[in-house]
Amino acid sequence: MAGVVVRNLSIRFGETEVIKDLSLDVQDGEFLVLLGPSGCGKSTLLHSIAGLIDVSGGEVEIGGKDMTWADPTDRNIGMVFQSYALYPTMTVERNMSFGLRIKGTPKAEVERRVNRVAEMLQLQALLQRKPSQLSGGQRQRVAIGRALVREAGVFLFDEPLSNLDAKLRAELRRELKLLHKNLGSTMVYVTHDQVEAMTLATRIVIMRSGVVQQIGAPPEVYERPDNLFVAGFIGAPAMNQLTGVLTTGAAGTRFTSPALQLDVASYPFKSTPQAETPVVLGVRPENLQICTDGDLEARVSLVEPMGNHHVVWLDFGGQLLSTLVSGALPCQVDATVRFTLDIDRISLFDCRSEQRL
C-alpha cells in the first residue's frame, strides 16, 4: 500500500488553468473520492497522479517518493477507466494477465494473481470467455480485475460505473466497497455521482473549477457544508435555501425573511455575526417535518412518489421547499399543511462570500 501527496499542483492547457495550486493528502489505505460537476478538473487531477498528463507546477508523491515526472509504468499504480478498453480477441484470463505477461512475470505467479482476483470478483466461470460474450457489468469487473492483478500500491478509478445501468451501478458499488474492505488498498475514485461518493468514500474531495471546495467524511460534508456550492451539490433533493438577514439586538440573534422569523441564537457561529448581514439559511429536506401542530404553514405544490418515501414540495411564501415523507402520504396537492423545521440542523451562509457562518 502507499499514500499519495499532491503539493501545490497546477495544470494548464494553453491559456486555460484547469487545476489551480491544489494540495491533497491521500492517506495510506483510504478510499478517497473526487466529486464535482463535469469540467471541474477531477479526471485531470487523477490523470496527473497516474502520469498521463504533465503538470505545469507542483509535485506528486506516491508511497513517499517524488513521482512528478516518473513514467506511468514506474508509479506502482493500477488504473480503471470509464471505458472497459478490453482486447476483443483475448479471453478474460488473457486480458487480465496481459500486463503481467509483457513484464515477464513468471507463469505460476501470473496464474496465482489471476485466480485470486477472479475469485474476489466472481469471474472464475468467465475466464475463457471473450469480451463480446460478457455483459457490461462483467466487462467492467474484468477491467477492475486487470488493475488488481498488478498488486499496485495505489488504485485509480476514473468514473468506472458511469456507462452502466442503475442496477449494475448499485451492484458494482457494493462490490467495490467490499473489495476495499478486503484489500485495504489506497484507492482514488472520480465520479460526478454523489450517491457513489457518499456510499464509497472514506473522505470526499468536492471540486469546482479546479479548486477544492471541501474535504471531509461523507457525514461531515453532508451535515456541515463549507459553502453554498457544497450545500447545493450534495444531497437529493438539494438543501433548501432561504434568503434573509441576520439581525442582532435585545431579542438576540434572529434570521428574518419575508416568510420566516427564526431565533438562531443557539447556532454555532464561527465568529460573532454582524448586524444586518445578508445570509442564506439552509435546511435539509429530512429536517422539515409536516405535522398538525407545526408552527409554519405552506401549500403542497407537488408530490413525487419514490417507492419507500415521498418527496413533497411546499410553496412557502413563494419559495419551494422539499421535505421527505415516509409511509402513507398525509396530504394532497394544493392542500394547506403545517410543518416545523429542526433549528439544531440548519446551516447559515454569508450571501457575499457564500461561506458558512
Image: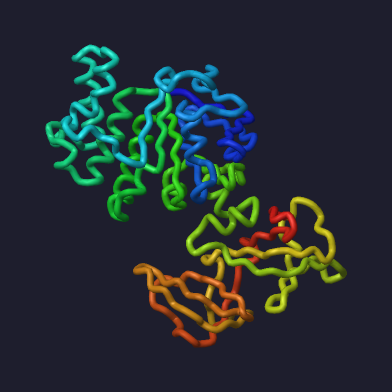
Is residue 107 placed above or below 40 in the rendered structure?
above
Viewer-closest of 286 and 99:
99
Q: Residue at x 49, y 87 (%)?
A: 334
Q: Residue at x 36, y 48 (%)?
A: 162
Q: How is the image coloured?
A: rainbow
The one nearer the camera, 96 or 285, is: 96
Task: In the displayed orientation, state which residue is furthest to the front.
Answer: 14
Task: Depth check: give the residue in front, 316 or 67.
Answer: 67
Give coordinates of residue 163: x percent, y percent.
Answer: 32, 49
Marks counted in the figure total 0
Does residue 72 lie above or below 219 as drawn?
above
Taking the view exactly as shown, the residue that stands out farthest to the bottom is 335
Quarter that holds the N terminus: top left
**Image quarter hosting the C terminus:** bottom right
Q: Quadrant of residue 229?
A: bottom right
Snapshot quadrant of residue 289: bottom right
Q: Residue at x 22, y 25 (%)?
A: 114
Could you tell me residue 130's position as x and y percent? 15, 36
Q: Quadrant of residue 165?
A: bottom left
Give the left or right position of residue 225, taking residue 162 as reference: right
Foreground of the two, 250 or 34? 34
Against 108, is 353 above or below? Answer: below
Horizontal and vertical percent position of residue 65: 53, 17
